[in-house]
Amino acid sequence: MNEHPPGGRRRGGGIAVDGFGSVVVEPDIASLSVTVRWQDHSLASARSVVATKATAARDHLVAAGVASTDLQTSQLSVHTIRHRPDGPRPPGSPGSQNLTPLTEFVVATTLTAVFRDDIARAQLAVDGLFDVVGEGLELHGLTFECADRSAARIEARRSAFDDARAKATQLAELAGAALGPVQSIREGGSNRPPGQPMAGRAMVMAEASIPMEGGSLIEDVLLHIRWSIAHPDPS
């Protein structure tokens, strides 16, 4: 009794292809890292200046719409710098071997702020920070992300499967066969196929004096799928 599948029979190891799927995701979260750093001969003075400026930065970020739960002190550091005394003296001159190096203290603290939903506020917040903090302000980066990529990943996975199936179908036709059932599916890393660029979109500029690009994010999926091959039954 013929037990081959209806309309054909399986032969060989099947067809294995990779499928790529990607979906453009609009960012809705902006993360800003800000450091306040001050250097002084007095440790107490350096700490006082940093405390005042960091408080001003924090209050400004809260006023700009950052929730208190989205503000975090990610770093606090104190270190010293030793300098040679001013006025170099010739070797052998009186006191040249007994000069005490000058010591300065560097105090720094870093705040990380997360802007949600309306990420354009991050641009205005950055401009305002220069006004309220002034000297001693350091910006370490503004990054963008999407809070929930689950729906985009589902769609990217569907697109990747369709891409793989189209490739496998063509290969089967070229071999004079048809696709049988799927034998295996494995999801790989997030890799875009060669030559596929990252999508981009200019972030709303508002009235900030420093241009920033929110861009667009890409959620991509790579699937490794193997199909069996169904050859026409010669009988």
Image (tube, rainbow, N blue to C red):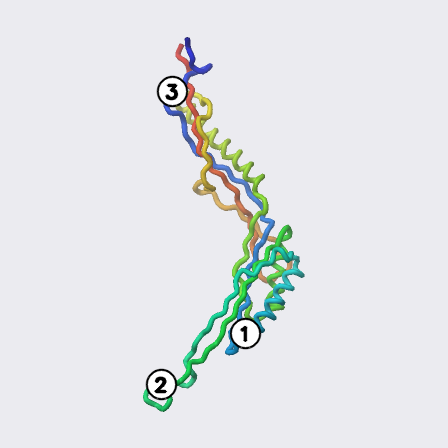
Determine which of the numbered discs, if any, sits on residue 120 in the image: none
Q: Would you say 131 lies left or right of 167 here? A: right
**Residue at figure coordinates x 50%, y 37% from the top left:** 21
199 relative to 182, above or below = below
- What is the number of callouts on the image? 3
Camera-nearest residue between 51 and 150: 51
Q: Position of residue 116 (x, y in %)?
A: 62, 52
Residue type at mark 2: give it: Gln
Q: Which comes before the other along the chain, label 2 or label 1?
A: 1
Tag 2 residue:
97
Q: Which comes before the other along the chain, label 1 or label 3?
A: 3
Residue type at mark 1: give it: Ala
Identify the secondary structure beneath mark 1.
Answer: helix
Other residues around mark 2 within 10 Å, as few (<14) / some (14–19) / many (≥20) = few
Residue type at mark 3: give it: Arg
Q: Would you say 178 lies left or right of 125 here? A: left
Q: Determine contact: label 2, label 3, CB under 8 Å.
A: no
The alpha-carbon separation of the residues under discs 1 and 3 comes to 78 Å
Question: Residue lying furthest bottom in this view?
Answer: 94
Question: Residue lying furthest top in this view?
Answer: 1
Camera-nearest residue between 183 and 76: 76
Tag 3 residue:
11
Q: Position of residue 37 (x, y in %)?
A: 53, 69
179 relative to 189, above or below = above
Quarter of the picture containing the C terminus is top left
Tag 1 residue:
46
Q: Position of residue 124 (x, y in %)?
A: 63, 60
Q: Would you say 125 lies left or right of 163 here? A: right
